[in-house]
Amino acid sequence: MPYSSEEQTLRRETIRQLLQRGPAGTQQVLVDELNQRGLVATQSSVSRDLKELGAIKTSQGYELPAPAAGLGDELRGVAEFLRSVTPAGPNLTVIRTAIGAAQRVALALDRSGWPEMVGNIGGDDTVFVASDSAASQKTLIAKIERARS
């Protein structure tokens, strides 16, 4: 059964409010909470809502990303998850993170707006970052290292 736009908006706002209080361990936790509040929700609808809200999965569960801050401040917010930063050729940098933190680090990198990055891919504990040149890569690594300290 398709949801009305109003139901979808209300469900997403409720999810946002729930996640602002703290992480949700699983999507099912959110489904149960929404159903208790009288909102019709399934795991697949909650999954779509989380994606639309920009929620990320961390080791604590689903969370909303921190609000956008100044240039590089995003990465400082996830610096505790960084384990190593290694160049892999002239255009690819490999960032190892704590388990389950790579997507959060990748999102922070995206939000940093650093021009040295062409793009990145975050897995579970590894982020691959592409740069357009070796010089850009060196600048990027220096920025990441500064954020870590």
Image: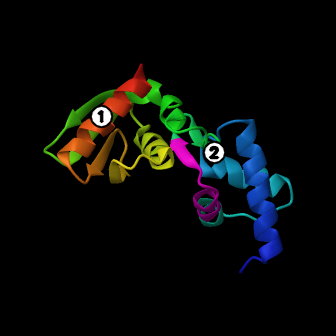
Identify the residue at image location x=64%, y=57%. 53
Q: Residues within 10 Å of mark 2 (few under 14, many from 20)?
A: many
Q: Give the percent coordinates (x, y) of residue 141.
A: 29, 34
Residue 54 lies in magenta, yes or no?
A: yes
The three-letter amino acid code for the residue at tag 2 is Leu
Q: Quarter of the image containing the C terminus?
A: top left
Badge 2 element: loop
- In terms of secondary structure, what is the magenta stretch mainly? helix
Whether residue 93 is visible to the viewer of this picture, yes or no, is no
Is residue 141 in view from this perspective? yes
Q: CA distance from mark 2 to mark 1?
A: 26 Å
Q: Where residue 20 appears, x then y in whole percent? A: 73, 41
Could you tell me residue 6's position as x and y percent? 83, 72
Q: Residues within 10 Å of mark 1 (few under 14, many from 20)?
A: some
Numbered circle sitting on residue 141: 1
Name the front one of labels 2 and 1.
1
Q: What mark, if any, has residue 64 been given in the picture?
A: 2
Indicate the quadrant where residue 48 lies: bottom right
Residue 68, percent from left and from top:
61, 43
